[in-house]
Amino acid sequence: MVVLDCAIALHRGWRERSRKARRMDGRGYTWFGEVLYRILRSRGSSQSALAREARKRGHDYRQNSISNWMRGVHAAPRGLPALLDDLYDLTEEEWVELAVAFAYGQRASREDLEDVREFRRFYRRMLEEEGEEVRGSLKGEERKD
C-alpha cells in the first residue's frame, strides 16, 4: 500500500508540472481544441474563417464560440464534425482523430488523457508485480502442506 501511495504522489506531482507547462503555451486548448487547431492551421484557415464559412451554410457560429469550444468552456455542437468534413475534406486519419477528440476530449487536454493512460500502465505493472509476489508466496505455502 505504501508503494501505491508513493506512485499516486509522484503522478500528482508530474501532472501538476505538466499543467503549469501547458499554461505557458498560451492557448489552453483541450484535446479537441488542439485537433481542431491543427486542422484549421493545415488548411490555412482560422477560427474567424471557420465561423464565416459556417454562417454561409446557415449555422450561427461566431469566432468567440469556436474559441470557447476549443478551450472547453462550452461543448461544441453535434453537427460540427460533419461541417468540418464538408468544409475541409478531412482525411480518414483526421476524421478519426476529430471524432475521438470530439467524443472524449472536449473537457480534457491531451496531456491529462495521456497522464491517465500512463498512470494506468504504471498501476497495472504494479498490480501484476504484486500479484506475482502473492502467487509465489501462495505456491510456497502449498508446498509446505
Image (tube, rainbow, N blue to C red):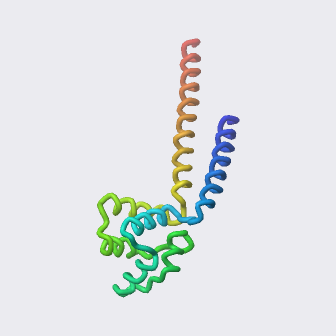
Q: Where is residue 93 in the image (x, y as percent from the top left)?
A: 33, 58
* Image quadrant where one finds the N terminus: top right
Residue occupying image coordinates x 63% and y 45% = 11
Q: What percent of the width, then of the height, locates residue 84? A: 36, 72
Task: Answer above or below: position of 47 versus 125.
Answer: below
- Which residue: 53% across, 32% down? 128
Q: Judge from the rendering whether residue 56 lies leftward or rightward of residue 132; answer left or right.
A: left
Identify the residue at the far front of this view.
44
Residue placed at 38% from the left, 82% from the top? 54
**Residue 14 versus residue 7: which sits nearer the camera?**
14
Indicate whether 97 appears above or below 129. below
Residue 49 figure quarter: bottom left
* Left or right: where 129 falls relative to 90: right
Between 92 and 144, the one lying in front of the other is: 92
- Judged left or right of residue 4, residue 29 is left
Q: Is residue 62 above or below residue 73?
A: below
Q: Indicate the quadrant containing the C terminus: top left, top right, bottom left or bottom right.
A: top right
State the residue in front, 4 or 84: 84
| Whole-percent x, y for residue 20 in the image | 65, 56
Picture mark count: 0
Residue found 54% across the figure and 65% down from its top: 29
Residue 109, image x and y in percent? 54, 59
Please indicate whether residue 25 sits to the left or right of residue 105 in the image.
Answer: right
